[in-house]
Amino acid sequence: MGGMFIDIGIPEDYKTAQHSIPEWIKKEKKPALFIDKDGTIIEDTGYTHGPKITIIKETTEVLKKYSQKGYHIIMITNQAGIAKNKFTIQDMTDNIDSIVNYYKKEGVIFDDIEYCLYHPQAEIKEYKYISLLRKPEPGMLLKASEKIKIDFASSIFFGDNKKIDNINLPYLKSIIR
Ligand SMILES: [Mg+2]
């Protein structure tokens, strides 16, 4: 937490807190560029995994721009291939590491990376689950917002699939203070 302390047991401080706390929260929050992985950051080869990646160059320019603007850069990716036994968590990690390393050289750091391992038609029993983490559900974004203060109203979701990447950010703003 930051260095501010207000004793709301003191009437004057309580009065101050009514406006200073919301202002402080607002100032602390920055917008995020939430970004999908497969088909957005890298070419989607179908259950894309492993260290070999093909970067989508146009996306690099977008990430550089928003990173320089001060947006949090947060990767949000459904990884049903693990539930469906197409590849392992290590294969996914190798894939993400390649992306992170490429972007580090481009001057872009990912503030957070969230992935969903679950799928209702999973082959692996422990991942057979209707999860609120799986896009288009907003769970991964909420999970990120527990770690990083995010201003959802001015955030953007950048993806390649209208059905699952079109997450209602103003709605999240209405439920997250
Ligand atoms: Mg995609």
Image (cartoon, rainbow, N blue to C red):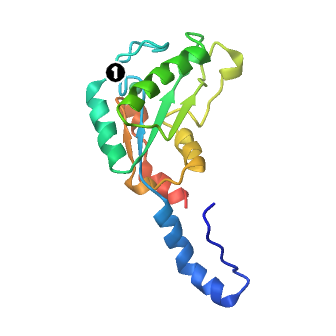
Query: What residue is pinned by disc 1?
Result: 55
Q: What element carries label 1?
A: loop
Give x and y (percent) for residue 25: 53, 65
Height in image: 78 above or below 90?
below
Which residue appears farthest toward the top when viewing the image? 86
- The quarter of the picture where the C terminus appears is bottom right
Q: Which class describes the residues within 10 Å of circle 1: few (<14), some (14-19), or many (20+)? A: some
Q: In this view, does 174 lie to the left or right of 41?
A: right
Give x and y (percent) for residue 40: 35, 27
Q: Which of 12 and 134 is in front in this view?
A: 12
Give x and y (percent) for residue 146: 60, 49
Tag count? 1
User: What residue is rendered at 61% in x and 32% in y?
Assistant: 131
Q: Is mark 1 within 8 Å of ligand 1?
A: no
Which residue appears farthest toward the right when viewing the image? 9
- Label 1 sits on what residue type? Ile
Height in image: 138 above or below 92?
below
Image quarter for ligand 1 equals: top left
Give x and y (percent) for residue 80: 54, 20
Looking at the rendering, which quadrant does residue 86 occupy?
top right
Q: Is residue 43 left or right of residue 135?
A: left
Q: Is residue 175 left or right of residue 158?
A: right
- The quarter of the picture where the N terminus appears is bottom right
Q: In this view, does 133 lie to the left or right of 72?
A: right
Looking at the rendering, which quadrant does residue 176 occupy?
bottom right
User: What residue is rendered at 49% in x and 72% in y?
Assistant: 23
